[in-house]
Amino acid sequence: MARTKKQPVIEKIVEKKEEVEEEEVEEEEVEEEEVEEEEEVKEEVEEEEEEDDEEEEVKEVEKKELTKKQKKEELETELDNEFAKIAKFSKVYKEFRENMENACIAIKKATATTKKINKMYHEDIRKARHMKRKNPNRKPTGFAKEKEFPDNMLDFIGVPRGTKMAMPQYTKRIWQVLKDKKLVTKKDSKNNGDGRIIRVNNELQKVFNLTDDMVKTMNETKDSKDVNGLNFMTLQSYISKALKA
C-alpha cells in the first residue's frame, strides 16, 4: 500500500505525542520521587526533633536530679552547721551551769560566813555591854541616871517621898501599879483584841496633869498605838512631861 504524504506528518505527531507522554510520565515520576524525598526528609526531621525532645527531657530530668542533689547537699550542710551550733551551745551552757553552781556554792559559803561573823559581832557587843554594866566606877547617864520625882508621882506608885529613881525603874513600877489598879486593858473583843491601853482615872489625871478633853480621848481610844492615847508606847513621854511640869 502506497504511503501518502500525510503519513510522515502523522508519525511525527504520534512520536511527538509519545515523547510528551513520556515526559509527563517522567515528570510524574520525578514529582513522586520528590514527594517521597520530601516525606523522607520530613520523617528524618521529625525523628531528629523527637530525639532532640528526648535529649531535652533527659537533660531536664538530669537537671532536676542535680538540683535535688544540690538541695540535699545544702540541707545536709545546713543540718551539720546547726548540729555544730547546738554542740557548741551545749558546751557553753554546760560551762555556764557549772559556773552558776560554783557561784551558788560560793554564795552559800559567804552567807554562812557572814552569819557567823554577824553572830560573833553581836556576841562581842553583848559582852562589851555586859562588862560596861559591871564597871563599878561608871556613872549612870541618861535614863539610867537617878532623878528626883514629884511627891504625887511617888505617892501614886507607893514609894516614900524624896526617893530618887531612874526612868526605867519608875516606868516599870508605874506599869505594874496601873495593872494592879486594873487601868490597863486586856486583849479582848471590847478593845478590838488590842491590849496595853491605859485608862485614866482622877488620880492618874492629876499625876500627869491631863485636861478633861485629853482624858476623854484616852479613855475612848481602842488602839494601843494611838499617839493621842495613853498606852505602853506613850507612857514614857507623859512621865517626862510630868517631871518637867
Image: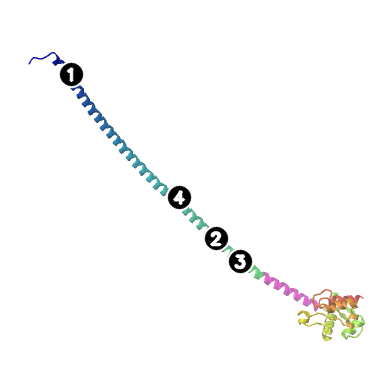
Q: Which residue is mark 3?
A: 104
Q: Amino acid at mark 4?
A: Glu
- Quadrant of the image occupied by residue 207: bottom right
Q: Nearer the viewer, mark 2 or mark 4?
A: 4
Residue shown at 73% from the left, 73% from the top: 122
Q: Position of residue 192 (x, y in %)?
A: 76, 79
In the image as oriented, which residue stretches furthest toward the top? 5
Q: Nearer the viewer, mark 3 or mark 4?
A: 4
Element class at badge 1: helix
Q: Which residue is mark 1?
A: 13
**Gap between marks 1 and 2 measured at Cα:** 116 Å
Left-right relation of 188 to 113: right
Q: Nearer the viewer, mark 4 or mark 1?
A: 1
Q: Which residue is mark 2?
A: 93
> Does 162 appear above or below 38?
below
The numbered mark, 3 or 4, whose residue comes first in the sequence reads 4
Left-right relation of 154 to 55: right
Q: Which mark is residue 74?
A: 4
Residue shown at 45% from the left, 52% from the top: 75
Q: Which residues are magenta?
A: 114-134
Element class at badge 2: helix
Is the stretch drawn in magenta largely helix, strand or loop? helix
Nearest to the observer: residue 21 or residue 110? 21
Q: Amino acid at mark 3?
A: Cys
Image quadrant where one finds the N terminus: top left
Crowd rating for badge 3 (residues with CA inside 10 Å; few <14, some 14–19, many 20+): few
Element class at badge 3: helix
**Gap between marks 1 and 3 measured at Cα:** 132 Å
**Gap between marks 3 and 4 measured at Cα:** 44 Å
